[in-house]
Amino acid sequence: MVTKENIPEKGAAVQKDMKSFAIIPYIPGGLVDPKTLHKIADVADKYGVKIIKLNSEHRIGFYGVKEEDIDPIWDDLDMEPGGFTGKCVRASKFCIGNSSCKKAYQNTINIGLKIDEKFHRMKTPNKVKIAISGCTNSCGESNVRDIGLIGTPKGWKLLVGGTCGLQARPGRLLAENLSESQVMIYIEKILDYYVEKNLPNRMGVFIEKIGFERFKKDINTSLY
């Protein structure tokens, strides 16, 4: 079973000039309260951070950080790092879901936070991105993620193997009409299978090499 061993260490990513760094605190699903926003702004101001950027994964990044300020900034923020790179499960991306959106069928926040709690930062053969959307508009971009969830009136659709970029591919439907608990089991089985096979490819290419029908059969068999 996948475990949280070998979690990437807290730190910062060196920038283009090879002198300054970027640090990205962990903000699950982009959910943030005013107190945290004030703290982020105060810390950035204290250390003279010139660029604060909201990125596409619902995170707030500090860019242009001096090397000697990295540890003091983390201490003052008192937040977990969220900008993990490398071969692990990244923080989930999810839309606001039916807690606020009139078009959404499912609660993306509840399941998104559960997925993060259980799988975020787990070691995998290649990076794994998970996205959750409350309806078929797919505002969370679930169709182009390694594992994608889309809410429907009957439950969750589960897609696998999607990716964006120069070699974009849509995810393929693995299961539908799933409950929240069933989704969690499916994701665990998918990640276990991915780690067990230990091929270095992203999920979409991995599934292509295994063969989608075999992949689907193996995952469904492992559920029982």
Image (tube, helix red, strand yellow):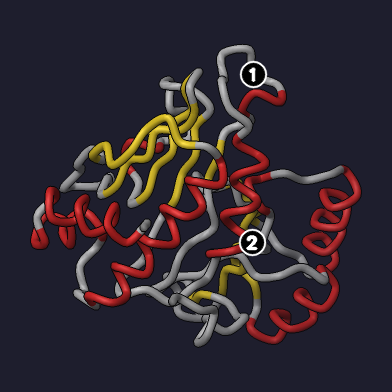
Q: Which residue carries the number 1 mark?
A: 101
**Mark 1, other Cα within 10 Å: few <14 / some 14–19 / many ≥20:** some
Determine whether, in the image, residue 21 is placed left or right of residue 78.
left
Residue 1 point in image, percent of width and height: 44, 77
**Residue in the picture at 56% in, 41% down:** 180
Residue 24 point in image, percent of width and height: 62, 63
Determine whether, in the image, residue 90 is placed left or right of residue 193.
right
Residue 87 point in image, percent of width and height: 38, 74
In this rendering, the answer to whether 212 lies above or below 90 is above
In this rendering, the answer to whether 135 lies above or below 54 is above
On-image quarter of the C terminus: bottom left
Q: CA distance from mark 2 to mark 1?
A: 24 Å
Residue 32 point in image, percent of width and height: 77, 46
Which of the 4 image quadrants contains residue 126? Answer: bottom left
In this rendering, the answer to whether 105 lies above or below 25 is above
* Numbered disc in front, either 2 or 1: 2
Tag 2: residue type? Glu
Q: Residue 117 shows which numbered tag?
A: 2
Tag 1: residue type? Cys
Determine whether, in the image, residue 29 is placed left or right of residue 147.
right
**Residue in the picture at 42% in, 30% down:** 177
Q: Secondary structure at mark 2?
A: helix
**Residue in the picture at 49% in, 32% down:** 133
